[in-house]
Amino acid sequence: MRREFGGTYRGATTDERREQRRRRLLDAALDIIGTQGLSALTVRGVCEQARVGPRFFYESFPDLDALAGDLLDEIQVAALDSARTAIAETAGGQADKIRAGVAALIVALTDDPRRANIALAQAHGSEALMRRRFVGMRRVAAVIMQEARLLLDIPEGEDNALTALAQLITGGAAELMLVWLDGGLKVERPVMIDVVADYVVDMVDRLPALAEKLES
């Protein structure tokens, strides 16, 4: 059996070379899934595009579902990080911070059409990827709850209304962006961002009434 040289080669250690190969595989998967669809992803194809030998594929990923799932996670986490940064760096009131976070999230997801396609559309073609999408949406919902708690000074433990709010926002915004991406909402992106931001601000304003209804 061949063994990979364990020292430094061309200035890179074994771990660095392994991470470089993983990065190339993720980049290749982004291009293949994002432009041709999930059904076009094969081990041979992604390895050829990444210029990585097939044996090194399994060094980084157990199967294609894991590769696509890790790519989806990466896209979602990057978008969330952009939203959190925008909220933290935006001066002004609650509505200003919400709008900044919404805009940053949507821009991060849709600036690259390939990333938008993977995050919003391609997951529907795979049970494994759909499970990862659900995890990602719960991650987004958790961030919404955290930020809403901070912005509105909501005490710990009052979670029913926050949970309902976060799920309504996450599901509604994701479906609207999917319709927009598919051409069903024929508006420019800034308009779509304003629509989503208005929806989120209105939902947050309705939080006290929602809490009262859920506890009645």
Image: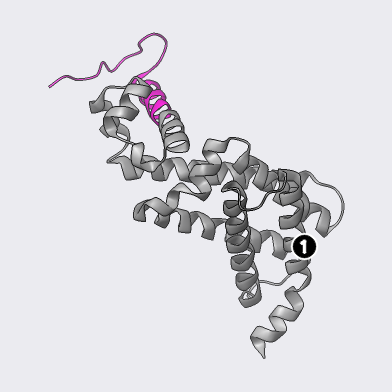
Tell me: residue 162, above or below residue 34.
below
Up-down relation of residue 31 to residue 96 (above or below) = above
Where the N terminus falls, by quadrant? Answer: top left
**Is residue 19 covered in magenta?**
yes
Secondary structure category for the residue under label 1: helix
Q: Residue at x 65, y 60 (%)?
A: 144
Q: Is residue 153 visible?
A: no
Circle 1 packing at 10 Å, graded few (<14), some (14-19), many (20+), is: some
Residue 113 placement: quadrant: top right
Q: Furthest-top residue in view?
A: 10
Q: Quadrant of residue 14?
A: top left
- Residue 158 horizontal/vertical position (percent): 65, 76
Q: Residue furthest right?
A: 92
Residue under the image location 52 percent in, 36 percent down: 114
The C terminus, quarter of image: bottom right
Give yes or no for residue 101 being in the magenta stretch: no
Picture coordinates of residue 140, whole percent (x, y): 58, 56
Identify the image quadrant of residue 12: top left
Residue 39 percent across, percent down from the top left = 34, 42
Say above or below: 133 vs 68: below
Q: Return the x and y of residue 160 as percentages of the image width and height.
A: 61, 77
Residue drawn at 40 percent across, 45 percent down: 69
Image: magenta residue range: 1-25
Q: Which residue is mark 1?
A: 201
Q: Residue at x 34, y 44 (%)?
A: 66
**Residue type for callout 1:** Val
Front in this rendered view, residue 111 or 145: 111
The one of 74 and 187 positioned closer to us in this rendering: 187
Q: Viewed as shown, does residue 39 lie left or right of 200? A: left
**Residue 14 appears in the picture as rendered:** yes
Closer to the camera in the image, 211 or 181: 181
Q: Is residue 3 left or right of residue 192?
A: left
